[in-house]
Amino acid sequence: MRVTQHPILGDLEDEKKVTFYYNGQPMEGIEGEPIAAALMNAGIRVFRTTAKRHEPRGIFCAIGRCTDCMMVVDGIPNTRTCVTTLKEGMRVEKQEGLERIRTGEEYK
Amino acid sequence: MKELTADVAIVGAGSAGLCAAYQAATAGADVLVIDENKRPGGQLFKQIHKFFGSKEHQAGTRGYVIGEQLLQKVEESGARVMLDSLVYGLLPDKSMGVISNGVNYSVKAKKIIIAAGAKENYMAFPGSTLPGVMGAGAAQTMVNVNRVLPGQKILMVGSGNVGLIVSYQLMQAGAEVVGIVEGAPRIGGYGVHAGKIRRAGVPIYVGHTIKRVFGKEEVEGVEIAALDEKWNMIPGTEKAFEVDTVCLAVGLNPMTELVWMVGCEFDFIPQFGGHVPLHDANMETTVKGVYVAGDVTGVEEASSAMEEGNMAGVAAVEALGYLTREEAQKKKDEIRSRLDTLRSGVFGEGRRKNKEKQIADMETYKEQYKEAADHE
């Protein structure tokens, strides 16, 4: 959920909205914010599953250290979504285990 | 591989690194600051509370305002700041491997200042890996920098200043904090922060720990339990809360990877977050020409990180001849006196003793090294 009003920081100013795709579904985010923030705003908390036990993982450190938030972004797996900024048209997918670099037609 | 050179290269554009850059660049040195983040300022911009300390430390000014002022000063100082650039290696000849936008750089500098900061500690319990369990600092970044609430109903683990301040800031942004859990028999942070939490009606469960977090795909609830004097859970004391988020404010540890890599000697000081590099009063490590500043030398807070950065910056450019011994001494005396003020009082005394030990161990190391060299 977006914090639009804040007693110290004031109102959220007009930010540039972009559309990105989460598992193919169009979603709205703010240009330049971390991908993870846009997903969290949309209520998505499971970012990937582990390779061996297929356990869900989500944001833990939010500063690019723990790698729990890795997803497949524009075909590139293991992208740290907490330190990768959101751009118009970005394709963000939940990562299942290790995954491979996606090079299919849709990523040309 | 492209080559870059500088008099002083600084790793980290946070509180410590920016102060070091300001000091070194205003003395006339060619300064290059490298940071892996897209914005400078480190963790200052998520600190929306008023800082403590004395007037010299801008007590009463909010962290992000201090950050903005510092950035302005560094910009005017002429220091170059390279963002979105990762330092992945540091060798004893003071050359660094840096990758920036897919391009590899070799950075060679006469002096290196490592101000890499710290990262949050983890805590293991059943369910601790479920999405919705996160660092308190992570939640703080989300809410204050990215303006997104990490959850609606939150339980905080840890009542140090981070736990108390972040709980309050989550409430300021509209979340409900159901309680703060503290393993120790008393609250860890400042009374003034705890008072704000209590006035807001949030219970602080001292002598309690988290027993488990439950939920299928993400956090749905949490169970806490009281601890006996040996820190074992007391059966029958469990309390359950329906929450969607659990924040861990259980300390930080220094990000010392580059410091190890370059071959520095270390101390082990649990109160500083574990292994911390030996350094002298000038912040120079056991590897000549490599300095450290801020949380990487032992976890304290932003004000002392800034002063250590000032110290390292002054010392590095003094060694390069940009300041005379007298000029540098005057600056260092002032910085030292401000650091002493920060490391005093009920909360600062322990940190002062630890820092004295760290510097004393450095002296011992130097003597031993000298003896060994004499025998060769």
Image: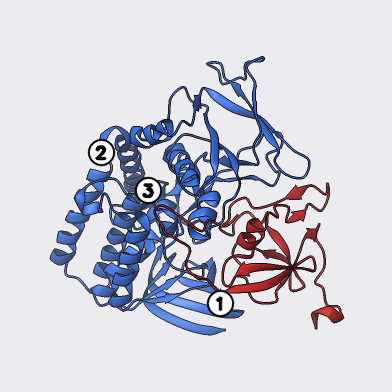
Chain colours: A red, B blue
Alpha-carbon span between mark 1 and mark 2: 41 Å
Chain ID of residue with mark 3: B
Identity of the amino acid at label 2?
Answer: Ser
Q: What x and y, as percent, mark residue B38?
A: 51, 70
Q: Is residue B220 above or below residue B234?
A: below
Q: Which mark is residue B301?
A: 3
Left or right of B77 in this view: B257: right
Kind of element beneath mark 1 = strand
The answer to which of marks 1 and 2 sits earlier in the sequence is: 1
In the rendered structure, find residue B344 and report the number of the disc placed on it.
2
Tell me whether marks 3 and 2 sit on the same chain: yes
- Give the amino acid type for the residue marked by disc 1 in the picture: Ser
Task: Please indicate, yes or no, whether residue B215 appears anywhere in the rendered image.
Answer: yes
Q: Earlier in the sequence, mark 3 or mark 2?
A: 3
From the image, tell me which residue sits under label 1. Answer: B100
Residue type of the residue flagged with mark 3: Glu
Q: How far separated are the C-alphas under marks 1 and 3?
A: 29 Å
Image-quadrant location for residue B219: top right
- Residue B202: x %, y % from top left: 48, 31
Dots 1 and 3: beta carbons under 8 Å? Answer: no
How many angstroms separate mark 3 from mark 2 (CA)? Answer: 13 Å
Q: What chain letter is assigned to the residue under label 1?
A: B
Position of the N terminus of chain B by quadrant = bottom right
Closest to the observer, B338 or B44: B44
* Quadrant assignment, res B7: bottom left
* Direction from residue B359 to residue B295 in the image, left or right: right
Query: Which residue: 65% across, 63% down?
Result: A81
